[in-house]
Amino acid sequence: MTETTGARGGSSPSRPGISASGIGSAGVGAADAAGLRVAAVSPEIVIGDLDGNLDRIRSAISATARRGAQLIVLPELATSGYVFADPEEARAAALAADDPRWASLQEAIPADAVAVVGYAERDGDLLFNTAAVLTRDARLADYRKSHLWGAEKQIFDSGSEAGVVVDAPFGRLGVALCYDGEFPEVPRRLALAGADVLALPVNWPLVPRPEGEHAPELIQAMASARSSRLPVVIADRWGSERGVDWTDGTAIIDEQGWIVAFRAVMGATAVLSLDAARNKALPPHNDLFADRRSDLY
């Protein structure tokens, strides 16, 4: 990995970051036949600035597309911001799934790629914290967050699924949102349903931790990846919003549970081995899934 330092442009604060590209379980440049180039990107997000956020998301997708990304993940509520004063403010920054503005954003997605974008979804009188799963030509899914954190319960309605698995051009994509990932059952469920990789848009508030330690949410994601050989692509917020400091935990985790790209200023990018992720064997005697004692738990 290489150290990088830089600013996100304009008046955005500069911050250190670590980036990795072409790193998989077999080492640098290990893009096997099923290698997947993934990117987690976190553009500047301004609460309530719906059109401005959409423009910045489009620019971020375009920049990542030039780097050959086949899976592009953006943060939770990337189109709207997160720390709403009340449901009315959230509704004013919400989008319907059929809003025509999505088409302009989709035009930036490469022909063989998928983008996962967090947004506040307006559906009649209901309001959801949702992740849109998009290609250039199609809308593959809209996953509505089922585990609501803190004041989200006062803003959003709860979704009815614990993550989703979507057929994507590269294989099967699992999608969950932020607090969903802190329930081990969710990534395990998605892995058992055949997910090859998990997209996890998040807004992780910064919490105290011992010097030199990763954020607890990131540690949980590493453990989930390792226990199911399910790589995780996490897009987190940076900076602060209305007094809430964000963890800046954007990261890519491989199927062994190791962080292979982390907090890069221009977006974390890596190549993941889907062959390794799909192989649950632990030679010579074990298998991660076959050894489960579902009769006991």
Image (cartoon, rainbow, N blue to C red):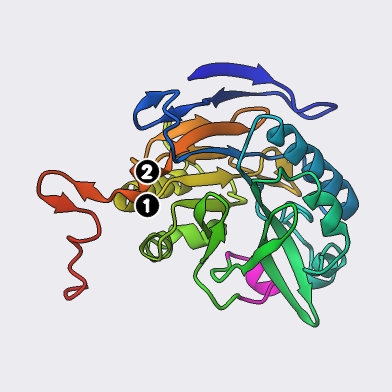
* Nearer the observer, 241 or 147: 147
Please tell me whether residue 153 belongs to the stretch shown in magenta: yes
| Mark 1, residue position | 224
Within 10 Å of disc 2 (Cα), the crowding (few <14, some 14-19, many 20+) is some
Q: Give percent across and percent down for residue 64.
A: 69, 34
CB atoms at circles 2 and 1 under 8 Å apart?
no
The C terminus lies in quadrant: bottom left
Residue type indicated by callout 1? Ser
Residue depicted at 88% across the width and 47% down the height? 52
x%, y% of residue 136? 74, 52
Q: Secondary structure at mark 1?
A: helix
Q: Which residue is mark 2?
A: 275
Number of the label disc, if any, that sits on residue 239: none
For label 1, count other residues whose C-alpha is less than 10 Å away and answer few (under 14), some (14-19) or many (20+): many
Q: First in sequence: mark 2 or mark 1?
A: 1
Front label number (2 vs 1): 2
Residue 86 image point, x, y percent: 79, 69
Mark-to-mark CA distance, 2 and 1: 18 Å
Who's the residue at 17% across and 68% down the image?
293
